[in-house]
Amino acid sequence: MPEEETLERAREDAAEGKAPSTQAGEFVHEEIEHVREGKHGARSTKHAIAIGLSKARRAGVKLPPPDPAKTSASTRRKAIRDAKKSRQPRKTSAKRARATLSALKKEGRQAASAKALSRQAKSSAMKRTRKERSAAEKKRPRRAHVHGSVVG
């Protein structure tokens, strides 16, 4: 279950009209913090991100399912299932929650290191096409000049 603070930050992002991926980023950040604090581990940085995105979908963030060309059918199905769970919330059984947590506790903590996150961000960015990078740049808010200095 996401922390109340994370849910609040995601709600604020939604109220400000920010993209679903920005709202989901709050949950991913929380997950990275959990691994760093030692609450549990993750197999890889991608694993930690996937857990965060799953939590976001279950909390009601309207994230679209991943692109079929880039992800497996099972990952897509899980994303769709997580989105459905947000519409029909049901508490996970204590036994299952405990089993999940104990499995995650056995995983390593390196997935949330600065080096691992940097490597993940770089490899992810390299996979983007020129068209995707261009579209992202066009969406980015323009910087405003205030008293000779650049803000933004």
Image: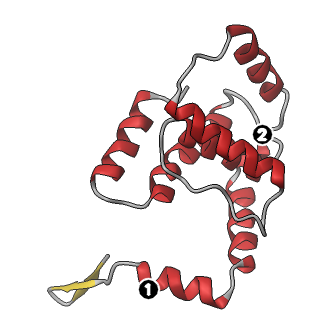
Q: Is residue 70 left or right of residue 56?
A: right
Density class for disc 2 (Cα within 10 Å; few <14, some 14-19, many ≥20) is many
Residue flagged by tag 1: what amino acid is it? Lys
Point 57% across, 56% down: residue = 64
Residue 42: where, in percent of width, then height?
Answer: 77, 39
State whether residue 1 is above or below residue 10.
above
Q: Quadrant of residue 56?
A: top right
| Residue position marked by numbered label 2 in the rendering | 42
Point 77% across, 23% down: residue = 100
Q: Secondary structure at mark 1?
A: helix
Q: Residue furthest left?
A: 147
Density class for disc 1 (Cα within 10 Å; few <14, some 14-19, many ≥20) is few
The way the protein has been coloured in the rendering is secondary structure
In the picture, the quarter occupied by the C terminus is bottom left
Q: Quadrant of residue 118?
A: bottom right
Looking at the image, tell me whether mark 2 or mark 1 is earlier in sequence order: 2
Residue 15 visible, this orientation:
yes
Residue 45 visible, this orientation:
no
Q: Nearer the viewer, residue 58 or 151?
A: 58
| Residue position marked by numbered label 1 in the rendering | 138
In the picture, the quarter occupied by the N terminus is top right
Q: Is residue 9 left or right of residue 97?
A: left
Residue flagged by tag 2: what amino acid is it? Ala
Point 66% across, 27% down: residue = 39
Q: Is residue 34 left or right of residue 126?
A: left
Point 31% across, 46% down: residue = 12
Q: Nearer the viewer, residue 22 or 79?
A: 79
Q: Nearer the viewer, residue 96 or 116?
A: 96
